[in-house]
Image: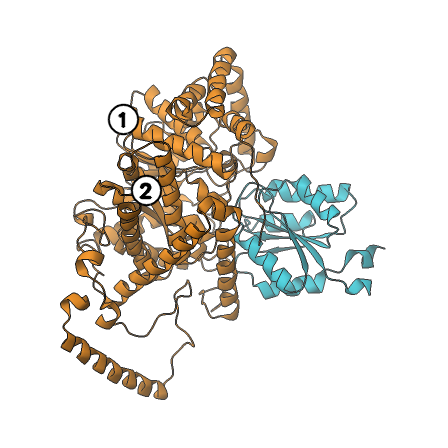
Amino acid sequence: MEKDRKLRILIAKPGLDGHDRGARVIARAFRDAGFEVVYTGCHQTPEQIVSTAIQEDVDMVGLSILSGAHTYSFPRIMELLRENRAEDITVIGGGIFPLEDIPKLKDVGIKEIFEPGAKLQDIIGWVRENVKPREAVSL
Amino acid sequence: MGSKSCSESTLERMEKEYSEWQEEYRKALKKMPERLNRFSTVSDLEVRPLYTPLDIKDMDFFEDIGFPGMFPYTRGVQGSMYRARLWTMRMFAGLGTAEDTNRRFHYLIDHGETGLSTAFDFPTLMGYDTDSQLARGECGKCGVAIDTLEDMERLFHNINLEQVTTSMTINPPASIIWAMYIANAENRGFSRKMLGGTIQNDCLKEFIAQKTLMLPPEPSLRLVTDTVEFGTREVPRWNTISISGYHIREAGSTAVQELAFTVYDGITYVEEGIKRGLDVDDFAGRLSFFWNSHVDFFEEIAKMRAGRRLWARIMRDRFKAKNPRSMLMRFHTQTAGCSLTAQEPYNNIIRTTTEALAAILGGTQSLHTNSLDEVYMIPSEEAVLIALRTQQILAEECGVTHVIDPLAGSYFVEALTNKMEEEAAEYIRKLDELGGMVAAIERDYPQMEIADAAYHFQQQVESGEKVIIGVNKYPSERPDLEFVLRIDDSLERGQIERLVRFREKRDKVKLQKAMDELRRRCEGPPCWENNVMPALIDAVRAGATEQECCDLYREVFGTYSDPGSF
């Protein structure tokens, strides 16, 4: 059945920081968990990320950032998803965030934020619980 | 020590008693088993319960250990080590604007820091001015924003550049930032011959680990070699490359991978310098190294000791260096950022202390100690002072600096040092087979070795095999520390306004002429007549911004982006 297909996930690193250890580890963990994973490498603009998410027809985008520039890039990515009528793609974030920023990021539509020390199994569990194949929902 | 000083009869007795002890050990385990299924370093190198002279019986004291300041330099690069001069206490600092960072520099110097180290923000690191669309949201967040020579002037205001040595963590745009540093120093009346410091300028580890990417590998190496050539001729007290394992380790490598890939990067830079026509003994003495000091105490000490010996042998045997200075692996160390935890952040002080102690016992020339809040943000004044004081306490209270290389002769430390050197040499042979580091990078070889190690470690953390206190054992929540720094987004606007005003007042004709000369040199074959450095110094004096120079590089040399493998 269509809704039983593998989840498709984009792991993306917005901004200019090159701290990609977390992104690459979670990409592998998602792949090992049976998801289809696309990882586009460091230094992606919000425009590139949204364009890849749509072209690759993903169910979820995982954003990884450690530079502090999430204050610009995360809301911008959410805005572009809405403009492209792709707001049903689940977006989560991982990395380092000032505590007071986390509610603000959730307000703009980021579904969950995973902080340093988060367990891979917890993140995978969250995805299984909260993300469904998109077509099954929207079509 | 070794067969040369251990008679056959002593060895026989030792082997016999070793077997007896093994029996004792087995008996003891029957009463109470070992705490762990397997004992291994943080890099997952298995260690045995006991080491004896048997483990180092093939070592030769003179060939393998020797004396400090003498080949093979296992015990240190200077004859006197910390009895004469302590390592340079060099805290990595950069935040907000040039003025903010200058204030931090003065704060650290006033509290006893002995060298400067500059952290640039991501747009500066990647070669973009603050008003670039790609720089949005990044200004001053992870370091200081430097777009122009004027920013550089403000950064080093009231600092005597002939007295202090300055390290600058900058890679693809290293030549430009260095040109700004030299131009600013000369404008203030200092002589370039007297300037001391370091530019990181290690492009290879960017492809391997840190991912500050701009140009493809070949032209990146050309620019690095331009700076080596220029430094050799014009700025003789400057370390032209800081060949860095730090970022390789932070990306998740093992200690052996950090050692091996970094030493191989060093081999590559030496080969490039020789290809340029330089005599190895004229430039190799200004190459320096940069290690990570991770949380596994003995492994780090062994890595640093092995590194010195390995490099000395490579310089003597592979490159036929004659000048002892060419054989010295002088290095800076930073405690491991990746070992810090957001949970119970005060525990980070303890981690940093043992990591700093390992760096000291490993014989570092310079040290940055991480602040307890560096896991959230660039450090606050409160936290950075504790980190600096950590070094000072280790240096002046604990007595660990009185005796040179005090762990030499430890059966375990010597055996682990040998193991590090042997396993690194194995990687070096593999990299030679692959056709060198550039070829290996193009095949994604070091990148994937690191990714494998990082994933393996994470799985060991998940299973609890590797313990992180406060995270997977005694788990705890992240607290809200009131002193954590916050860089305001409004800073970006101020820096952009300053940049726009700067651009307006430049002499356009003079600038164009300087940029034309820079382009001519970039387009020409690599040689002293086409060395970019003199042209860059003129260009930044004429008002070229960092990005304008980098854009020219990108136009002439092409760009490189992360292949995104995992």
Q: Chain of mark 2?
A: B
* Image coordinates for residue B476, horizontal then vertical, percent: 50, 64
Colour in which the image shows chain A: cyan
Residue at the spot of label 1: B193
Instruction: Answer whether residue A33 is visible to the viewer in this image.
Output: yes
Position in image of residue B259 (x %, y %): 37, 53
Q: Residues within 10 Å of mark 1 (few under 14, many from 20)?
A: some
SS at badge 2: strand
B25 in relation to B8, above or below:
below
Q: In the image, what residue occupies the spot 48% across and 14% down?
A: B513
Quarter assignment of residue A51: top right
Rendered image: mark on residue B288: 2
* Chain depicted in orange: B
Question: How far from the left and from the top, in percent, is residue B147?
Answer: 48, 28
Most foreground residue, A95 or B483: A95
Residue B96 visible: no
Q: Are marks 2 and 1 on the same chain?
A: yes
Amino acid at dot 1: Lys
Which mark, by number, is residue A56? none
B229 lies left or right of A118? left
Which is more toward the observer, B159 or B526?
Answer: B526
Whether residues under marks 2 and 1 lie with C-beta atoms below 8 angstroms apart, the answer is no
Q: Amino acid at mark 2?
A: Ser
At x 35%, y 30%, the residue is: B229
Identified at 45% across, 20% down, the residue is B539
Which of disc 1 and disc 2 is earlier in sequence? 1
